[in-house]
């Protein structure tokens, strides 16, 4: 998939099955299970998707998934299923002829474990960056919150996923909207976390956006009220979505969804005075 001189390649770290109530928050199960049926344990499939951005200046990876730290015992303890029939993120990268050494920049929308877990791995008894040449870009507010845990957040921030980046000199903290390289920028999008950021790609007259957890699934960008129970500030996330709904629709931007099991990318159109995603690339 290309927009002008920029190549966009979705990659995957597999699929995790998590509790459906967490993903859909206050939306009743009788409503959400019509669009995304759950298993016998109330779990729904959530893709662990990332994106390779190839530009003339750099090879960029957006998100690193859960990584290779999750054992079957850990999955059972947390009542999740982790499915990786084709391997983990590094295997997905290799299918596009990209090795860890080829990645120049890693952009992390936030530091929850399903987004940053693959940023590090253990080699010779030490946690080291998975991508040895890359600079990892994170919002300073997100970094701060990941190190000031409370009862709500300590179950999803784990320092082994990101502290080794700073120790290796590969961490770049940014504050607010930031240009990464020609045609690629980071934009603050608070709500899911205070330091949440999304990735905007612009080349020629074309635009693409990686939404991260602003909306897990395409239904959540169509409907403002559908926010997850994991959002630190759901009201702020609703307002963030309100802004991006119009922005995305006006520009007919290509939207990449991180966790959607059915739609990898789509465009937000208006239909009968309501927003609706028109799939461009299905899973």
Image (spheres, grey):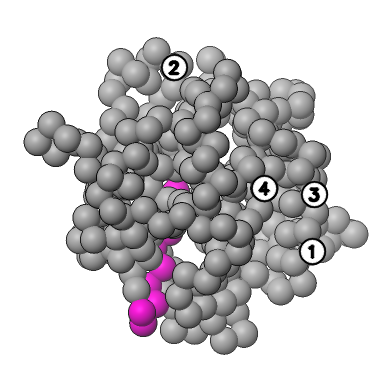
Residue 77 is left or right of residue 35, and the answer is left
Dot placed on the residue nearer the N-terminal end, 2 or 1: 2
Q: Which label was assigned to residue 246?
A: 1
Provide the residue designation for mark 3. 239
Relative image position of residue 180 (x, y in whole percent): 47, 70
Kindly indicate whether the residue at mark 3 contacts the one at mark 2 (C-beta within 8 angstroms). Answer: no
The image's mark for residue 190 is 4
- Tag 4 near tag 3, CB within 8 Å: no
Closer to us: 133 or 63: 133
Give the farthest residue toward the right. Answer: 273
Q: Is residue 60 above or below residue 168?
A: below
The mark closer to the camera, 3 or 1, is 3
Q: Which residue is mark 2?
A: 78
Q: CA distance from mark 4 to mark 3?
A: 9 Å
Q: Residue at x 73, y 44 (%)?
A: 237
Residue beneath the point at 47% across and 33% down: 147
Dividing the picture into quadrants, the one containing residue 204 is: bottom right
Q: Secondary structure at mark 3?
A: helix
The numbered mark at residue 169 is none
Of 185 and 56, the residue lying toward us: 185
First along the sequence among labels 4 and 3: 4
Residues in magenta?
A: 45-57
Q: State whether residue 33 appears in this view.
A: no
Q: Residue 52: x, y in percent?
A: 39, 63
Indicate which disc, 2 or 4, sits on the residue closer to the N terminus. Answer: 2
> Which numbered disc flags the more N-terminal residue, 4 or 1?
4
Instruction: Rate crowding at label 4 as few (under 14), some (14 to 19) or many (20 or more) other CA atoms within 10 Å.
Output: many
The reply to whether discs 2 and 4 touch (Cβ–Cβ < 8 Å) is no
| Nearer the camera: disc 2 or disc 4 | 4
For the stretch drawn in magenta, the main secondary structure is strand
């Amino acid at each position: 998939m290309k927009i002008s001189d920029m190549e966009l390649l979705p990659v995957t770290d597999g699929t995790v099955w998590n509790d459906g109530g967490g993903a859909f928050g206050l939306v009743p199960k009788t409503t959400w299970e019509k669009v995304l049926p759950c298993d016998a344990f109330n779990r729904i499939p959530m893709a662990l998707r990332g994106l390779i951005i190839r530009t003339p200046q750099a090879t960029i990876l957006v998100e690193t998934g859960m990584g290779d730290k999750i054992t079957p015992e850990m999955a059972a303890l947390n009542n999740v299923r982790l499915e990786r029939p084709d391997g983990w993120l590094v295997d997905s990268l290799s299918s596009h002829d990209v090795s860890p050494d080829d990645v120049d920049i890693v952009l992390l929308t936030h530091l929850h474990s399903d987004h940053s877990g693959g940023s590090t791995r253990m080699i010779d008894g030490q946690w080291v960056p998975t991508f040895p040449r890359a600079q990892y870009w994170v919002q300073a507010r997100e970094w701060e919150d990941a190190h000031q845990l409370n009862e709500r957040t300590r179950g999803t921030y784990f320092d082994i996923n990101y502290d080794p980046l700073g120790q290796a000199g590969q961490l770049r903290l940014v504050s607010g909207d930031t240009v990464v390289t020609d045609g690629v920028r980071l934009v603050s999008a608070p709500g899911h976390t205070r330091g949440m950021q999304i990735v905007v790609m612009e080349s020629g007259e074309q635009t693409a956006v990686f939404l991260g957890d602003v909306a897990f699934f395409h239904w959540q960008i169509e409907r403002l009220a559908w926010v997850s129970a994991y959002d630190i500030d759901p009201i702020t996330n609703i307002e963030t979505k309100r802004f991006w709904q119009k922005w995305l629709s006006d520009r007919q931007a290509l939207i990449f969804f991180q966790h959607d099991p059915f739609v990898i990318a789509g465009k937000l159109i208006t239909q009968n005075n309501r927003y609706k995603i028109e799939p461009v690339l299905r899973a």
